[in-house]
Amino acid sequence: MLRPQFRAVRTGQRYLREDVDALVARVLATAERRADGTEITVDEVRNAAFMTPPLLVVGYSAEDVDSFLDEAERWLPGHRNIQSAVPATPLGPIGERVAPRFTPVRWREGYDVTEVDAFVDRVMATVNGRPVERPVTAGEIRTIQFSPVRMSEGYDVEEVDAFLDTAGEWLSGPR
């Protein structure tokens, strides 16, 4: 596995290079399954925080590092991908469709958790025939737009979008 190359910047959002290098070394060791005592968990990657270098001291681009960490989560043991987030058989033990659990993201853009949860609750009530104040339509699923969040916890955009595709199929019925 190749070591990532981050842009070196003197201004703007940047991270202390030594902090980033130490975390990246642990991520690579874990992803490459090297048992050298430096293993890291997905939660540690998600909760990583870096110091900002003093003014005009070179650091790594925060955008580059954040993008790398988002991708790195997928390489680590314990990461759930969309296949595990949306059940292959979307029926629970009592015959109802089951709401997915989305991967929280912090280092890259995600969807607002509160908005997604509220909408998914309405979708699940609608598809499972439970009472809901405003049932969701297939048209609403096609046009819904969630607020983007960054640097605070949000839901993985790809997973939410994949769920919306599935929910749209549920509400559209067979073609």
Image (cartoon, grey):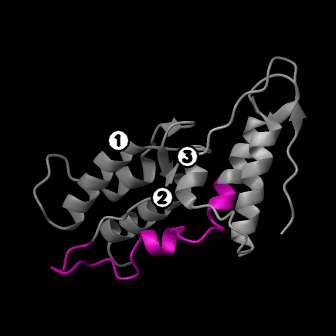
Judge whether residue 75 is colored magenta: yes
Q: CA distance from mark 1 to mark 2?
A: 14 Å
Q: Position of residue 43 (x, y in %)?
A: 52, 55
Question: What predominant SS class does the magenta segment belong to?
Answer: loop
Q: Is residue 25 magenta?
A: no
Please give the residue where the numbered disc 3 appears in the rendered image: 47
The type of residue carrying mark 2 is Thr
State how many labels appear.
Answer: 3
- Seen in the picture, residue 54 relative to 99 is either above or below; the reply is above
User: Residue most toward the top?
Assistant: 55
Residue corresponding to mark 2: 103
Q: Earlier in the sequence, mark 3 or mark 2?
A: 3
- Residue 57 is left or right of residue 102, and the answer is right
- Disc 1: which residue: 114
Q: Residue drawn at (83%, 69%), measured in percent from left and top?
A: 1
Q: Quadrant of residue 25?
A: bottom right
Q: 28 left or right of 148?
A: right
| Identity, as a three-letter code, of the amino acid under mark 3 | Asn
**SS under mark 1:** helix
Q: CA distance from mark 3 to mark 2?
A: 14 Å
